[in-house]
Amino acid sequence: MNIVLEDGSTADSTKASGKPAKLNIGDETLSPAFEAELINLAQGDKHSFTLQAADAFGESNPDAIHHMDRTKFPADMNLEAGVIVSFAGPGGSEIPGIVRDVLGDSVTVDLNHPLAGRAVTFELEVIQVL
């Protein structure tokens, strides 16, 4: 599966990693619009479709953007726009965040999914249906 942005660039590709994505229909991890695109596909089918942000990775949530004090990060950490940092989440999970800005001792971290707020095109080939 390829995830393609509006400018034609590839944001992610399971083909590049050689590890197919496993998608479970009906377990509520996929949006209803995404599932509707997959429901009638069979092994060997190729399909391309575009979803708006709300049906793909969600809208960007301003409440997920945090201004943090520089002292909350390791002293030797390189903090600049674009750097991905990891925070401890519930149950030992990790929550990635993207540094958006650093002004003096204030670090702006965005915990939204990197593709939130963007329309994306999915290009996929069904390898197997279980």
Image (tube, rainbow, N blue to C red):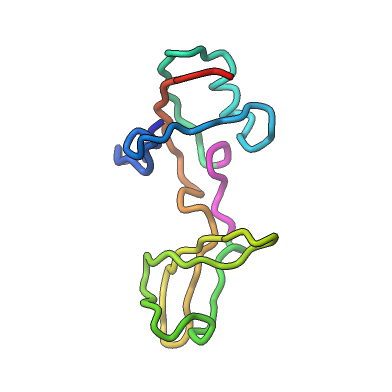
Nearer-the-camera pick, 96 or 50: 96
Give the residue displayed 41% in from the left and 21% down from the top: 125
| Main secondary structure of the magenta stretch | loop
Residue 105 in the magenta stretch? The answer is: no
Q: Where residue 76 sits: x, y (%)?
A: 39, 83
| Quadrant of the frame with the C terminus | top right
Q: Where residue 25 sits: x, y (%)?
A: 63, 26
Nearer-the-camera pick, 8 or 30: 30
Asked if residue 70 lies left or right of residue 76, the reply is right
| Quadrant of the frame with the N terminus | top left
Residue 60 in the magenta stretch? The answer is: yes
Asked if residue 124 lies left or right of residue 86, the reply is left
Give the residue displayed 50% in from the left and 19% down from the top: 128
Q: Which residues are magenta?
A: 54-61
Residue 65, quarter of the rendered image? bottom right
Q: Is residue 22 above or below residue 40?
A: below
Q: Is residue 108 above or below residue 69?
A: above
